[in-house]
Image (cartoon, rainbow, N blue to C red):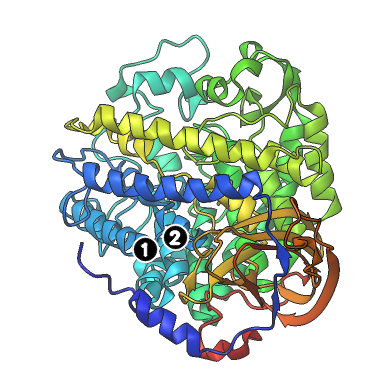
């Protein structure tokens, strides 16, 4: 693999880190005697992940980083399926993965980008034109690379964001405050939703999700053939192939990433304007966000007055599953950029409306379009009566009832820390027919889905969760490795390009929850949330140092509890704890465990040892970073007193010259 241009070599980074002033710090003094099971399992998971990503790269990619694929792509779909394979590789690096993992992730982005350009899918390294449900998936890799190596990715990330903030590129209409079409990107000549005479909607997809514009055919009318179906042809192009759609709100994540990288006011202004326009439309619709805005800037003007019915909107194909995450991505972006937390009300009324229309039933009694998902996620409880909420709304009213995925309400609460958002989660748990403490070894496309048992752990009634989720993560990886063996020699056809996602052995949800104290990133275009992150001070890089394990055990509005363990019996480690994913919080002070008495060791002829006398100490910090010295075989529990969102989010690190001493 060629050397990466992303920055200095590990040795150079370490040398620079040694000369940089350290943030305020504390030293662990409590001896590590019996290693916690979660700490051992966590480090074993890092080791297994290191083996796994290397094996995937060897078996499934070429020398230049591209995926092994020899076919064409015949529709507009597919870009996301190439980038998604690697989305969590730089995330794993940020968690503490191998030094060369960042180079590998960059190498694969470059290789896949060249590959997709050759396939005619990209222009100027960016998607020519597709919906933001899929674009958001494609861009997660870019967002994590931006966080891990901002000096390398800033110029490219800003260029991509400018496709939306600068009207000259044809995507944004500042007069009506809309993105001009559902399929948007780098090619202004790509119009509508499909090339040819009709949308390429497969019969199996129609059976599960129905059709767009279903009101164009009265009930009982025989369905015409694909080429002459008005729901998939010219009427589709005219009515929902132009104008804005709610899923485009995920573009705010791309612009937020540019703002974090640059601090340029124009990005903040665009987020405020665009998300603010959608918030006004939601308010005018009784709080529930509509899914469409015509080219004239009016909700429903192309759908005979309907607030629903857009491409990837409330009616088709997935409803809340696409609208909810996109709206939250935008709301979080606006809140971060402006400091105005009321932007979160773009999401809350719609979420509460969906929940209010819920019913208790079994999966078999529901009209779910995603039955296979729940068979995997609920396993033996799939037939247990539980709260089902409607995902979709059309002329039929609310329909497509499913258990509510917890990603959106969890991410909402994690950011806001508001009592009302926590109470919503508690009500959802009370209405659940299955035990939220149960951990199952599944891996969804979103590499998420274990929010409920994690929330139960944070609530104090699921103490075994860390070890069980780490075991489940290992099971997921070993399953993926077996799948890799099965399909390694497959000459992948276009219809099966999801095989790479289904075989990617990198799993990070458990590490994100346990070490960063955060839910997994919102998969359709979110930026990572975190209560804390870490840096290896001696190596001068992001992530936990080798043989160090971390566990966030408590998240409260102004406090976070973190346990750090150095399993190494010989080598000291130095961890810098950062408050927030982007150093946006301030650590006012820290209380921590200490042991100043070595009498627990006993005398020369003692057969055993005593118990260390653990006390509490405190220190003032007043900054986003805290240095923790971990001598060999030590542990420490930190209680961080935080002021949330007091600093401008940034990808700066404690090693940057402007951050000398760790105060800014």
Residue ID for mark 1:
102
Q: Neighbour class for label 1 at 10 Å: few (<14), some, many (≥20)?
A: many
**Residue 170 seen:** yes
Instruction: Identify the image quadrant of residue 456.
Output: top right
Residue at 17% x, 57% y: name it.
Answer: 64
| Residue 238 shown left or right of residue 25 in the figure | left
Nearer-the-camera pick, 605 or 36: 605
Q: Is residue 397 left or right of residue 200?
A: right
Whole-percent x, y for residue 181 in the image: 42, 52
The image quadrant of residue 595 is bottom right
| Front residue of this view, candidates 77 and 415 | 415
Counting from the top left corner in percent of width and height, residue 191 is at 32, 50
Q: Quadrant of the C terminus?
A: bottom right
Q: Which mark is residue 86?
A: none
Q: Quadrant of the N terminus?
A: bottom left
Q: In percent of the image, x 75 and y 28: which residue is there?
A: 357
According to the picture, the residue beneath numbered tag 2 turns out to be: 93
Q: Residue furthest front?
A: 605
Mark positioned earlier in the residue sequence (2 or 1)? 2
Query: Viewer-proximal residue, 310 or 275?
Result: 275
Q: Is residue 664 above or below residue 339?
A: below
Question: Are the two marked residues, 2 and 1, in contact with CB atoms closer than 8 angstroms?
Answer: yes
Distance from Cα at disc 2 to Cα at disc 1: 6 Å
Above or below residue 99? Residue 115 is above
> Left or right: 536 with respect to 164?
right
Q: Is residue 302 left or right of residue 357?
A: left
- Disc 1 on helix, strand or loop? helix
């Amino acid at each position: 693999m060629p050397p990466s241009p992303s920055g200095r070599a590990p040795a150079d980074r370490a040398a620079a880190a040694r000369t940089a002033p350290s943030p305020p710090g504390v030293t662990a003094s409590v001896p590590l005697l019996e290693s916690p099971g979660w700490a051992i399992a966590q480090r074993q998971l890092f080791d297994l992940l290191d083996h796994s990503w290397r094996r995937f790269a060897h078996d499934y990619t070429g020398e230049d980083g591209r995926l092994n694929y020899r076919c064409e792509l015949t529709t507009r779909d597919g870009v996301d399926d190439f980038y998604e394979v690697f989305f969590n590789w730089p995330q794993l690096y940020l968690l503490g993965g191998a030094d060369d993992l960042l180079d590998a992730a960059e190498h694969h982005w470059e290789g896949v980008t060249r590959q997709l350009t050759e396939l005619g899918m990209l222009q100027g390294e960016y998607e020519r034109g597709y919906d933001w449900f899929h674009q958001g998936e494609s861009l997660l890799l870019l967002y994590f690379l931006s966080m891990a190596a901002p000096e390398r990715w800033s110029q490219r990330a800003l260029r991509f964001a400018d496709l939306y903030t600068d009207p000259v590129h044809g995507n944004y209409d500042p007069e009506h405050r809309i993105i001009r079409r559902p399929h948007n990107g780098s090619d202004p000549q790509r119009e509508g939703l499909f090339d040819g005479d009709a949308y390429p909607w497969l019969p199996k997809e129609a059976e599960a999700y129905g059709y767009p514009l279903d009101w164009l055919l009265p009930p009982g009318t025989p369905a015409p053939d694909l080429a002459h179906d008005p729901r998939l042809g010219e009427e589709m192009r005219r009515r929902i192939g132009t104008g804005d759609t709610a899923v485009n709100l995920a573009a705010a994540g791309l612009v937020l990433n540019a703002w974090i990288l640059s601090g340029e006011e124009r990005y903040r202004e665009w987020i405020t304007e665009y998300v603010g326009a959608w918030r006004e439309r939601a308010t005018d619709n009784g709080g529930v966000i509509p899914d469409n805005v015509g080219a004239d800037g009016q909700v429903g003007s192309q759908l005979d007055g309907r607030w629903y019915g857009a491409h990837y909107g409330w009616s088709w194909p997935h409803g809340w599953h696409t609208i909810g995450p996109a709206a939250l991505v935008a709301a979080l972006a606006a809140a971060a950029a402006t400091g105005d937390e009321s932007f979160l009300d773009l999401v809350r009324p719609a979420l509460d409306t969906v929940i209010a229309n819920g019913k208790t039933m079994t999966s078999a009694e529901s009209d779910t379009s995603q039955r296979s998902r729940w068979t995997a996620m609920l396993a033996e409880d799939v037939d247990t009566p539980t709260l089902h909420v409607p995902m979709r709304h059309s002329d039929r009213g609310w329909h497509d009832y499913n258990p509510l995925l917890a990603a959106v309400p969890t991410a909402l609460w994690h950011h806001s820390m508001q009592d009302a958002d926590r109470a919503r989660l508690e009500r959802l748990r009370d209405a659940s027919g299955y035990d939220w403490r149960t951990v199952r070894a599944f891996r969804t496309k979103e590499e998420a889905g274990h929010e409920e048992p994690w929330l139960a752990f944070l609530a104090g009634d699921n103490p075994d969760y860390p070890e069980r989720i780490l075991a489940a993560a290992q099971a997921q990886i070993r399953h993926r490795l077996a799948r890799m063996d099965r399909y390694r020699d497959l000459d992948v056809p276009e219809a099966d390009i999801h095989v790479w996602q289904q075989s990617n052995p990198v799993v990070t949800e458990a590490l994100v929850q346990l070490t960063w104290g955060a839910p997994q990133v919102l998969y359709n275009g979110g930026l990572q949330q975190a209560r804390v992150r870490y840096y290896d001070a001696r190596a001068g890089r992001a992530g936990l140092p080798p043989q160090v394990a971390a566990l966030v055990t408590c998240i409260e509005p102004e406090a976070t509890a973190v346990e750090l363990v150095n399993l190494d019996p010989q080598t000291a480690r130095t961890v810098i704890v950062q408050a927030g994913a982007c150093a946006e919080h301030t650590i006012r002070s820290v209380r921590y465990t200490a042991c100043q008495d070595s009498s627990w060791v006993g005398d020369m002829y003692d057969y055993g040892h005593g118990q260390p006398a653990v006390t509490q100490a405190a220190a003032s910090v007043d900054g986003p970073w805290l240095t923790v010295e971990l001598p060999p075989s030590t542990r420490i529990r930190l209680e961080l007193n935080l002021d949330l969102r007091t600093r401008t989010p940034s990808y700066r690190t404690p090693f940057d010259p402007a951050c000398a001493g760790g105060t800014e």
